[in-house]
């Protein structure tokens, strides 16, 4: 018996194995959204997407965090037709229409309203214990930032005004319990959180809830925004996804994603900034854009107005016929981590169909 066989025989840990045969290593299942910039923010590549583990979406109120989470959940549930969503609700601000607008079947959403973090921790721990590896489940928590602790609720009832020192500890405990199980059972979990500004001279957004979230999360987005106006009328927002922590994407990357009141998340938003930086697209005159032949540096094809760059007609040739996807990967992807992606051309065709 080899030493490795002896270790395997004597181990009391169920999944212990030679690392090359371990179920915890190897390609990870990724669910691609129909918005390439979201896939880039999640995995560093346009044909990547949401994988197992804990993703935290952090930002002030009205920063589209719930919508981003439902867009990712939609991708996961579309890929896995037998999957369900486990939705923990502390804000009670997501009407049924939210889910329906993303074509998420309501009979596949298990809604769990919770009053405090301790109740959430107990229920998630029970659910993850009963879930088998291979069960297709996505967990969404809306939100961590708005969840009170049990002590905070009890103090409010009794009139005790002492500061609550338990909340950060309970949150740290929650994520210590949850994170290993998400990895072992290959379950994606999206937790929505709030930010606050630091008290420094040059303040910066801080994710609420203490250090436990930072230690446990696989990926953390801090979302910023600015208004988009036509004249004096606000027509939408330009968001910037700041990658604060990631397994796959280079930290401190900034990925733009636009949203309009009429159409929601703009499918091709964010790509134009990348293509201009990489010299795949040029701006021959104000308000007009054109493809660039990377070998000669010459402009090729027809010119497009800015609003026309939000169409598949503009982006499919660039993504299909050039090495633009590789340039994006080289710019944003952290390392050569194995991702189980779909065939790239199939993903591209799906993007065009979902426009």
Image (tube, helix red, strand yellow):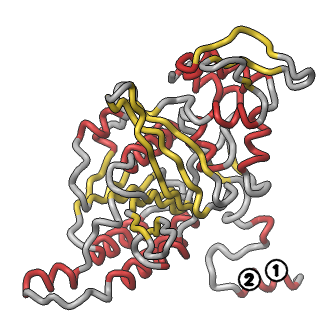
Q: Is residue 319 left or right of residue 75?
A: right
Question: Is residue 187 visible in this depiction of the protein?
Answer: no
The quadrant of the rendering that contains the N terminus is: bottom right
Q: Which class describes the residues within 10 Å of circle 2: few (<14), some (14-19), or many (20+)?
A: few
Q: Which mark is residue 9?
A: 2
Tell me the residue at 56%/49% (across/down): 50
Determine the residue located farthest toward the top in the rendered image: 302
Tell me the residue at 25%/88% (across/down): 163
- SS for tag 1? helix
Q: Which mark is residue 5?
A: 1
Q: Is residue 161 above or below residue 275?
A: below
Q: Is residue 105 left or right of residue 80?
A: left
- SS for tag 2? helix
- Residue 236 rendering spot, x and y as whole percentages: 39, 34
- Residue 291 rendering spot, x and y as whole percentages: 75, 19
In this rendered view, identify the residue nearer to me: 264 or 185: 264
Count up the numbered dots. 2
Residue 46 lies in what quarter of the image?
top right
C-beta proximity under 8 Å, tags 1 and 2: yes
Q: Is residue 70 above or below residue 24?
A: above
Q: Which class describes the residues within 10 Å of circle 1: few (<14), some (14-19), or many (20+)?
A: few
Residue 26 lies in what quarter of the image?
bottom right
Question: Is residue 188 visible in this depiction of the protein?
Answer: yes
Tell me the residue at 50%/58% (across/down): 222
Residue 249 lies in what quarter of the image?
bottom right
Q: Is residue 8 above or below residue 190?
A: below
Determine the residue located farthest toward the right in the rendered image: 296
Tell me the residue at 23%/66% (across/down): 114
In this rendered view, identify the residue nearer to me: 345 or 253: 253
């Amino acid at each position: 018996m080899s030493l490795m066989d002896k270790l395997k025989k004597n181990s009391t840990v169920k999944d212990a194995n030679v690392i090359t045969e371990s179920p915890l290593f190897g390609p990870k299942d990724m669910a691609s959204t129909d918005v390439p910039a979201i896939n880039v923010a999640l995995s560093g590549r346009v044909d990547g997407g949401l994988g197992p583990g804990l993703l935290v979406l952090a930002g002030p109120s009205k920063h589209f965090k719930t919508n981003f989470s439902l867009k990712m959940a939609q991708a996961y549930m579309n890929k896995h037709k037998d999957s369900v969503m486990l939705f923990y609700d502390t804000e009670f601000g997501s009407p049924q229409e939210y889910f329906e607008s993303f074509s998420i079947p309501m009979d596949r959403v298990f809604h769990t309203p919770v009053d405090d973090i301790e109740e959430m921790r107990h229920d998630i721990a029970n659910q993850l214990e009963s879930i088998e590896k291979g069960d297709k489940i996505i967990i969404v928590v809306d939100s961590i930032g708005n969840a009170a602790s049990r002590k905070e609720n009890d103090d409010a009832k009794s009139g005790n005004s002492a500061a609550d020192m338990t909340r950060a500890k309970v949150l740290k405990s929650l994520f210590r319990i949850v994170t290993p199980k998400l990895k072992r059972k290959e379950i994606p979990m999206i937790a929505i959180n709030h930010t606050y500004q630091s008290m420094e001279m040059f303040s910066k957004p801080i994710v609420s809830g203490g250090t436990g979230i930072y230690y446990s999360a696989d990926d953390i987005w801090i979302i910023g925004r600015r208004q988009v106006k036509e004249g004096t009328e606000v027509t939408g927002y330009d968001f910037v996804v700041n990658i604060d922590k990631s397994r796959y994407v280079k930290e401190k990357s900034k990925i733009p994603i636009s949203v309009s009141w009429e159409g929601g998340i703009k499918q091709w938003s964010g790509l134009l900034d990348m293509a201009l930086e990489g010299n795949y697209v040029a701006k021959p005159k104000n308000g007009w854009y054109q493809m660039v032949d990377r070998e000669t540096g010459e402009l090729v094809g027809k010119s497009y107005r800015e609003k026309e760059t939000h169409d598949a007609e503009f982006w499919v040739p660039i993504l299909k016929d050039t090495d633009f996807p590789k340039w994006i990967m080289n710019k944003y992807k952290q390392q050569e981590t194995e991702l189980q992606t779909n065939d790239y051309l199939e993903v591209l065709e799906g993007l065009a169909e979902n426009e």
